[in-house]
Amino acid sequence: ATVDQVHAAGLKAIVDMHSIPRPGEDWGTDSIVGDPTLFAAHVALVGKVATRLNGMDPDRTAIEVLNEPTGDCDAIWQNAGPRLWPDQLKRLHAAARAGAPDLPIVVSGACWGGIEGLEDLGTELPLDDNLLFSFHSYDPFLFSHQAASWTGGPTGFFSDVPYPPER
């Protein structure tokens, strides 16, 4: 019903499977990508949501299987540890495609969906015209997250920082 309301307003919709990456909480992104049982539940949820979206206008509707997957940072930045996200993403993509064969699927690389994670992903997924790649860039972090108290450190104390910086 919400997607229908978005369409009625003349907008396009991306249904974003967006959890909050909070350590120590069993429903956050960290837990979803780090716990095989929770990840399997997320794959099932993606399949159910995709099935509900099936038949919607693919020019106006897409599904994003997981916003900012937080895993694999050590593997990407320090070449240490396993790379779990490529296989996890294959499972999410398969669930979404099975539920909604014609809808665009939005995917991103590991480690917060940054460009490094996208580059590390390679060509693991079956490429088609309905596969959209996303990446997030937060550089400079002080600008993109100004006044965000939840970031920790001094960033939360900065606001109205112009970009590019004025001299």
Image (spheres, rainbow, N blue to C red):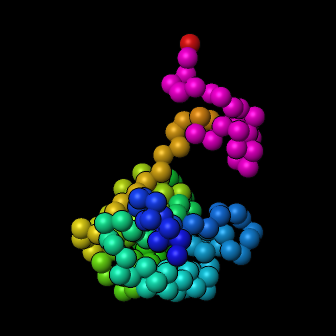
Q: Closest to the observer: 151 or 104?
A: 104
Residue 39 figure quarter? bottom right
Left or right of 42 in this view: 157: right
Give the camera-side residue of 148 and 88: 148
Residue 54 image-quadrant placement:
bottom left
Left/right of residue 24 with respect to residue 68 in the rendered view: right
Judge from the rendering whether residue 49 lies leftward or rightward of residue 62; answer left or right: right
- Which quarter of the rendering shows the C terminus? top right
Q: Is residue 51 above or below residue 128?
A: below
Residue at 49%, 81% in the rendered image: 49
Q: Residue 2 at x, y = what percent?
A: 53, 71
Q: Residue at x 53, y 61 (%)?
A: 68
Q: Which residues are magenta?
A: 144-166
Secondary structure mostly seen in the magenta stretch:
loop
From this view, report whether residue 78 is shown above or below residue 24.
Answer: above
- Residue at the image position 44 percent from the left and 65 percent from the top: 8
Provide residue 28's location: percent of width, then percent of height: 66, 69
* Residue at 43 percent of width and 70 percent of height: 63
User: Does residue 159 appear in this view?
Assistant: yes
| Quadrant housing residue 90 | bottom left
Does residue 161 belong to the magenta stretch? yes
| x, y percent for residue 20 | 65, 64
